[in-house]
Image (cartoon, helix red, strand yellow):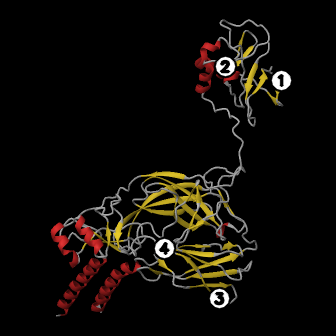
Amino acid sequence: MLHWVSILRPGLRSTERHRCPTEKETICGEDFQISRWRLSIGGDVQMSRAFLVRVILLAWPLVFGLVGSCGRFPGILAVEPEEVPVATVDAAPVPEPIAVPPTRTDAAPDLMMMTPMPPAPVPGPTCMPVDEACNGVDDDCDGAVDEGQSAIPCPDGGFRYCVDGRFSECPRRCDLCVPGSERVCFIPYCTYWGVQTCAADGRSFGFCREQRAPRECDVAVKNNMRSRELEQCCVDKGYCCLDEFDLDNDGDRRESIGSCDGVSCGL
Amino acid sequence: MRALTAVAATLFAILSANRVDADCDEPEIESTIPLQYESTLATVPPNATLSARYSASAVYEGELIVLKPDGMPPLTLMGTFDAVEGLLKVLPPEGLSPGRIYRVTWPGLRGMTGPRGKNTVVDFNVSATPDASAPVFSGIAALDWDWTRKTDPCTDELLDRYTFLLTPGGATDDGGVDALAVLVFQTSGPGIAAPRLVHIAAMPRVGKTVKVPLGSMQGVGTLCFSALVRDSQMRTSNANTQPVCVATTEAPYFVGCGYGPRSPKSTALIWTGLVLVGLSRVRRRWV
């Protein structure tokens, strides 16, 4: 009796078919070890237990049609749909029903889809070398990704670097504000006007400390208190102001607007 | 005698109050390449560009960098300053002599709104092998984080910061690792659309970490970091390093609404009041 098995060996890109060996046989130069957990059906059919369970659970209607198969554990066993059917040469008696169509069946794709095994590598398209770009892909087919990407100089200084398949943004002098600089903020009581100072590391402003509003904004304070109009006055009179009322309609109420040359980050 | 002591205490209180303001925006040198080590000297290749990184507000006005070879007269050199990276660089015109020990003095720079910072002195050795090829770096090996809370000298308030502790993986370079800089990028997190350079520091020695501070807004959530190394010729390592991520939580600090930290001026007033009370008691005894 001759059985055919499918064995995918590491390094091979396609599934090879081999005759199910005896314990003494060698395939492809390697000793072929049959699993210790093997079952004999009819005295000459050997199956690995794992494979048998898989087959019974996932494709039990075909189980009775399988004549036999065998597994090998350190390699990857992959049963491709086309190869599930096992050719038999002799006419050994097999349990009913016997018939296993020699071509792809409807059940075979399900078996493949549900089997919790690593997918068999399918020979993909041949790598077509092009110039390496910063995209997280091995464009020039040399096995390295994004290698040799030069840093791009930024107009204000610093560089953009290729990181994780993308070029970084141009660096900024500070995160949020120039250390020690001040901007106008608005408080909900008394003077409605305040000042906040940028922290020494430039990463945040301090609390808004109450101050008397400048004379030119007295009218806005009296008429509108803490309001959009007061912020507009702040901007119009040449201060750097917290955009609490989103005068520029960009949805950012934490940014600074107005005359912020010495306050905001940048050169 | 007591009166003199009281006056001295008053002066000290007033001066210490002013000192807080003076520290605000005084640019400090955050890192140098090479670093000054306590036990051994760093070694750089003979064609190395030396550099120092200043804090954000530093302004370069042509201050000279002093390079003194051991046993020879010092050289005064003009550097080039990249204000965005805060990096002051100098390339010795004749190169560095292999086997010789040098001392470089980095000048303190003035802040945009503050006083001049302090000088920093670094001693280093020079190897025989020039730096000719790009470094190789395996990326970030480990990442941890913590909160810090310090009184800020500019705002005189307690400010919360996240500190991310990155342990760089192995790095090699033909010019030696002491001349390498680590460039840390934040690749994801609040407000991050493209990788953002968040920190530059000298490559620490094995087992040491790089501290990356972020503001309380930028540091909360799931953040990912990636890193490159850059050699003294400004060549960077391969870009294909895996980012490392960490999830942070908001700091558990509560900002009270009634009383803030005592201001320096109020400290001075309290000292002055105490001294006046003491003086009045002394006067009563004398009378």
**Residue labelled with disc 1:** A25
| Marks 3, 4: nearer the viewer | 4
Numbered disc 4: secondary structure: loop
Q: Amino acid at mark 1?
A: Glu
Callout 4 crowding tier (Cα within 10 Å): few <14, some 14–19, many ≥20: many
Numbered disc 3: secondary structure: loop
User: Are the two marked residues, 4 and 2, in contact with CB atoms closer than 8 angstroms?
Assistant: no
Could you say where residue B137 lies in the image, as x and y percent from the top left? 65, 59
**Residue B262 makes an appearance in the image:** no
**Residue labelled with disc 3:** B74
| Labels 2 and 1 share a subunit | yes
| Labels 4 and 2 share a subunit | no
Q: Chain of mark 3?
A: B
The Cα–Cα distance between marks 2 and 1, rounded to whole angstroms, is: 30 Å
At x 79% / y 15%, what residue is drawn?
A2
**Residue labelled with disc 2:** A104
Q: Amino acid at mark 2?
A: Arg
Could you say where residue B107 lies in the image, as x and y percent from the top left? 54, 83
Could you say where residue B106 lies in the image, as x and y percent from the top left? 57, 81
Q: Chain of mark 1?
A: A
| Marks 2, 3: nearer the viewer | 2
The Cα–Cα distance between marks 2 and 3, rounded to whole angstroms, is: 84 Å
The Cα–Cα distance between marks 1 and 4, rounded to whole angstroms, is: 72 Å
Q: Chain of mark 4?
A: B
**Residue labelled with disc 4:** B55
Q: Amino acid at mark 4?
A: Ser
Residue A112, image quadrant: top right
Q: Chain of mark 2?
A: A
At x 67% / y 55%, what residue is drawn?
A132
The Cα–Cα distance between marks 3 and 4, rounded to whole angstroms, is: 27 Å
The Cα–Cα distance between marks 1 and 3, rounded to whole angstroms, is: 80 Å
